[in-house]
Image: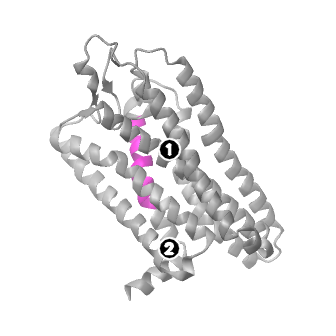
Amino acid sequence: MNNCPNVSSEKEFFIVAFSMSSVGQLELFFGVLVIYLTAVIGNLIIIFLVCLVPKLHTPMYFFLCNLAIFDVASTSTSIPKLLTITLTQDHWISFSCCMTQMFFFILFANGEICMLTAMAYDRYVAVCKPLQYHTIMRKNVYLVMAASAWIISIQNSVLHTTLTSNLQFCNSHKINNFFCDLNTVIALSSTDITGRQILMFCEVILISLGQFLLIIISYIFIFSAIWKIRSSSGRMKAFSSCTSHLITVILLYGPIIILYIKPETEDSKEQDKLLSLMYLVVVPMLNPLVYSLRNKDVLGAFLTLVK
């Protein structure tokens, strides 16, 4: 960054966020604030329940606890800054803060994807190999799976943040998003980013698409096993054990898939922001509701602690 002619202007980025009237900004602030607080409180309740209730000390709820941690952390990396922008109209963010936000966003976003894959494998073992479940999903096994999700996410985040921090930004510092998104930031660089774009494409294929395919394969085996169950009550019981996870996968991957497959135009930028907002605040809010309303164990544990 020291090679740019105007060094002082390079130390900050301007986050465009959402273009709307002052009344719209105020409505956006309160709307996002309510959803954000609901998401944080809901996921914290899931974390405390899993930690405090012995009945929930199982692999599935251990993964759910990690997913809740990722949800709280991912939404907290960007939404507070958006709330500050809408309330104070201060759109500037320092280069170091932008890189820090990017680091944690990539870390927790990748962590969510990896954790959903681990949960899919857990459901596969539970439905397809129920008699071997406790043998396969031993404590050291699911601990290693969770640790691997964290390690892969940290390594990927360090790689992308380090490469991005070494880019030069001499031309434009306007980030047309409401947070320091990797794609948006590197697009502003005056450095040749061809190598970064190839790396990002490979990363999307290996991590995002690869993990999604693993989930799809798991559910192909799960649905095949459920179809072979003779009694309708048995099929319903087996399927109900997977519905919460399946809904969570759809909620997470839905906005991501739409974001990547739709054509890029200038008019689509606002749509991209709305999809990102849904991914970052709406989905983390819905996940605890999905697992609490559709899961008797979680709901029962909550009622037990309340009493």
Label 1 SS: helix
How many numbered marks have been drawn onto this rendered protein structure?
Answer: 2
Q: Quadrant of residue 23?
A: top left
Residue farthest bottom in this picture: 307
Q: CA distance from mark 1 to mark 2?
A: 28 Å
Quadrant where the N terminus sits is top left
Whole-percent x, y for residue 89 in the image: 17, 37
* In the displayed structure image, the side of residue 24 where residue 252 appears, left or right: right
* Within-10-Å neighbours for mark 2: few <14, some 14–19, many 20+: many
Whole-percent x, y for residue 5 in the image: 28, 10
Residue 191 lies, with reference to residue 185, above or below; the image says above
Q: Nearer the viewer, mark 1 or mark 2?
A: 2
Label 2 SS: helix
Q: Amino acid at mark 1?
A: Pro
Q: Which residue is mark 2?
A: 50
- Cβ–Cβ under 8 Å for marks 1 and 2: no
Whole-percent x, y for residue 103 in the image: 43, 40
Point 83% across, 68% down: residue = 228
Most common SS among magenta residues: helix
Point 28% across, 48% down: residue = 80
Q: Which residue is mark 1?
A: 255
Residue 107 lies, with reference to residue 21, above or below; the image says below
- Magenta-span inclusion, residue 241: no
Q: Quadrant of residue 187?
A: top left
Q: Counting residues from the N terminus, which is met first, the one under dot 1 or under dot 2?
A: 2
Q: Where does the magenta region start and end?
A: 272-286
Q: Amino acid at mark 2?
A: Val
Q: Quadrant of residue 132?
A: bottom right
